[in-house]
Image (cartoon, rainbow, N blue to C red):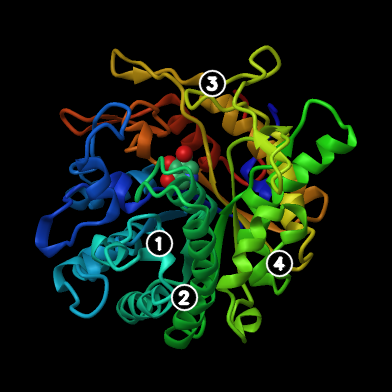
Amino acid sequence: MGDLARGDFGDDFTWGVAHAAYQVEGAWDADGKGPSIWDTFTHGKGRIRDHSTGDVACDFYHRSAEDTALVRELGFDAQRFSISWPRVLPEGTGRVNAKGLDFYDRVVDECLEAGVEPWVTLYHWDLPEALHQRGGWANRDVVGWFGEYVDVVAERLGDRVQDWMVFNEPCSFLLVGYLAGVHAPGVRSLRKFLAATHHVNLCQSVGASALRARIPDANVGTTHIITPPRTKQDRPKDRKARAAIDAFANRIFIEPNLGLGYPTEAAGLLRGIEKHLKPGDDDALKVDWDFLGVQYYQRQLVKPAPIPGLHAIPWMSKDHRRYEITAMGWEVQPDGLYEALAKVHAYDPDLRLVVTENGAAFPDRLEGGRVHDERRTAFYRAHLAEVRRAQADGIPVDGYFCWSLMDNFEWAEGYVPRFGLTHIDFATQQRTVKDSGRWFQRFLAATATATDAD
Ligand code: IFM
């Protein structure tokens, strides 16, 4: 790993950092913003590990210029951020909140002035509460609502933003929000999960078309978290278990937009999605992506389960003896990133891939103005080596985004896990670049042929 060099990844490789509106912006009700499902969820009782909310978070709403300058200072090319739908359309449809749109306009300009490419995600989990009251993602009308929202954003930002992602990780907000009920909106229903999944897949297509209608030269993609399943053994029932979880956690969110339909054969419980399909949907689902964003954190250990139609359950116990475990309880397995890239590449060898999120939470300590997070640096170096291995094997990966620029609100886990390259003191909003951030700064500053020596 001592010989990792920026130049090896190619001159056109994009180095970026990522974050998301609800996790960093704060200003939850400022300047006309409407409530999102995450405002409702966190303001309710007992749902967040440390009883926190995103009301203030990193106060990015008021500190975006400073934070964008930091992105530049660390040497990154791009900042990936998301738009809060209820900041732009407080009721989800209809009335546009000019001040909300102005904020994103400003962030885009701050990026461009700093020489940082703005990469915009249209939906990173904060549905307007008003739309949830009307059925949210489980109501097919969301397809029209979403198209309207994307059009409003594209019209305003499309003259300056070229790189777009329609969704962030549908798997996460659908499985965890609509089936497990652990994330907003806290729904536990297989029927609603399947309906919402189909509607999100339709919205991928509607969103991509709305972007292209306004911005003919846009690079339009979306992002998927890829969680390769693994089992302790490789018996036929283990293979069946892996296939079932793969269908539930990965394939149903990717394949319909590639024209491959739903993988109902791998998990009988998925068959319920068919009743939400209308004539013409198979074609309506197809998207000709310019790139796909691959997000990787961990493999999922699963075991066969005698549940009719499911065949498998995620196995929450960890191989603590075999793998390093992060503060999220996730196993560190860098070669899983290679596996995730290879898996998506297998769908279409010509499709550009970008690692739009990768990173880890560790129990950082701020001491004497420094955070010595060598485990995070080692994590990044090991995962970057897997990106290089993928490139060397002909997988066209041309970007990598760290999750995240700074510590932020980690959903149901609150502020306990820290994923940032920058430490945030949430009481004072003081930013302190961690050693891992400084490692990236040196790595990115090195000339094309220099190698990373430390
Ligand atoms: O913080 C999240 C992010 O919002 C989506 N991807 C995974 C990250 C870490 O859990």
Disc 2 to disc 4, C-alpha distance = 19 Å
Q: Amino acid at mark 3?
A: Arg
Which residue is labeled 4 in the image? 351
Which residue is labeled 3 in the image? 375
Spot occupied by residue 39 in the image (x, y as percentages of width and height): 23, 49
Disc 3 to disc 2, C-alpha distance = 38 Å
Left or right of residue 200, residue 158 in this image? left
Disc 1 to disc 4, C-alpha distance = 22 Å
Element under label 4?
loop
161 to 243, vertically: above or below:
below
Quadrant in the picture for the C terminus: top right
Disc 1 to disc 3, C-alpha distance = 31 Å
Asked if the residues shown at circle 1 and circle 2 are in contact, with their CB atoms under 8 angstroms apart, the answer is: yes
Quadrant in the picture for the N terminus: top right
Label placed on residue 207:
2
Residue 304 falls in image quadrant: top right
**How many residues crowd around disc 3 within 10 Å: few (fewer than 14), some, or many (20 or more)?**
some
